Every structure is written in C-alpha cells, then in structure tokens.
Amino acid sequence: MSTSASPTGSLPAEPADGIAAGGTVTDRLIEANQRYAAGFTDPGMDARPVLGVAVVACMDARIDLHAALGLDLGDCHTIRNAGGVVTDDVMRSLTISQRALGTRSVVLIHHTKCGLESLTEEFRHELELEVGQRPGWAVEAFRDVEQDVRQSMQRVRTSPFLLHTDDVRGFVFDVTTGLLREIDPA
Ligand SMILES: [Zn+2]
C-alpha cells in the first residue's frame, strides 16, 4: 500500500511505464483483458476452492500470492486489504468462505516493510480535520508485525462465526527474499 500519510493522496505527475500516451491505466487493463479472454477456456470449476483454504493477506503490490504459494486458479479464496488485517469485513468473507463454500484452513500473511508501519491512528484524526467526518473504521496501524500477526490469528481462532478454527496459521512475507516466516501464535 502507499506509505503516504496524506488522506487524499495524489496521482503521479508522470504516467507509469507502459501506459500508452493518452490512455489511462484502466484502458491498459482492459486491453490486457481482451488478450487474456482470447486465450481463455472455461475451466469448468465451481466456486468452492479446490484446496479448501482461504488466504488473508496485505494488498501490497509486491506480494504475488499465487506465485509465492504455488497456487493455481481455483485453489483458494484470496482476501486482501491494507495490512492483511482481520477486520469485520474479513470475518464476513471468511464466514462465507467456510459456511457457504467449504473452506476449512486459514492462512494469514503480513509482510516486511508494510505501509501500515508508517501510519498511526492519527491518520484518522487528520482525515476528520480535512473532511469534517470521522471514519467508522480503525486504521489498524502497527509497529510490531509479529504481534500483529498473532493478534490476527487470535481474532480468527476466537470467532464465533467460523466452523473451523483448528488450522489457522500466520506468516510474515519478506518482500526482499520472497520467503515466508511462520509466526508462533503463543
Ligand atoms: Zn502491507
């Protein structure tokens, strides 16, 4: 995620590499999709993940979850947000994943150099000052990534909504080596 502390942010003045002059990044994505669909064949899968696993991870652009975990199309549910934090909405997705779509394992992935490490709850205060309205959500900023993984594991394991809380494991992904490091829940 962006490490900018500005609530509003701004677009870069120069287009990123690979964006055709005059086109937006979304135009580029649409063109890529047309090439993708041209070579696409219906895999004939239903919505239930083949491996019965849900992965909760940070939205960070440096984490290619499928490549990093050896996952193929249809293998897992992927739930991502800023920080890979177990929010109420992540619990909503996990509950649907387990109760409606048959998953039973949960993998939590935070990572080194996360943008949330440079934010504080002051972000909400600044946002309120700027727009005149306090957001209903917490920033969920953290200083200790291992402790945050433990807290996330605890939230999942103690959820009353889930059917399966016996296989919940947490990791820190190192964005410089590509390696996962498992975090002891204790
Ligand atoms: Zn992150």
Image (tube, grey):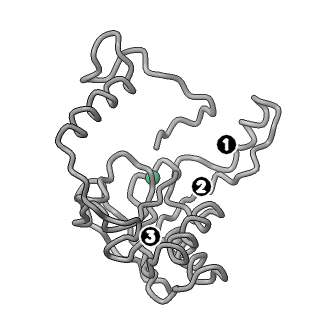
Q: Nearer the viewer, mark 3 or mark 2?
A: 3
Disc on the earlier residue, 3 or 1:
3
**Mark 1 Cα-neighbour bin, 10 Å: few <14, some 14–19, many ≥20:** some
C-alpha span from label 3 to label 1: 25 Å
Q: Is residue 160 above or below residue 4?
A: below
* Residue bearing the label numbered 1: 123
Disc on the earlier residue, 1 or 2:
1
Q: Secondary structure at mark 1?
A: helix
**Mark 3 Cα-neighbour bin, 10 Å: few <14, some 14–19, many ≥20:** many
| Residue furthest left in the image | 39
Q: Is residue 184 above or below residue 142?
A: below
* Residue bearing the label numbered 3: 108
x 32%, y 23%: residue: 16
| Residue furthest right in the image | 132
x 23%, y 39%: residue: 36
What is the quadrant of residue 95 in the picture?
bottom right
Left or right: residue 127 versus residue 77 is right
x 62%, y 29%: residue: 8
Q: Is residue 111 above or below residue 151?
A: above
Tell me residue 105's x, y (percent): 42, 80
Disc on the earlier residue, 3 or 2:
3
Q: Is residue 5 above or below residue 147?
A: above
Tell me which amino acid carries mark 1: Phe
Q: Secondary structure at mark 2?
A: loop
Tell me which amino acid carries mark 2: Ala
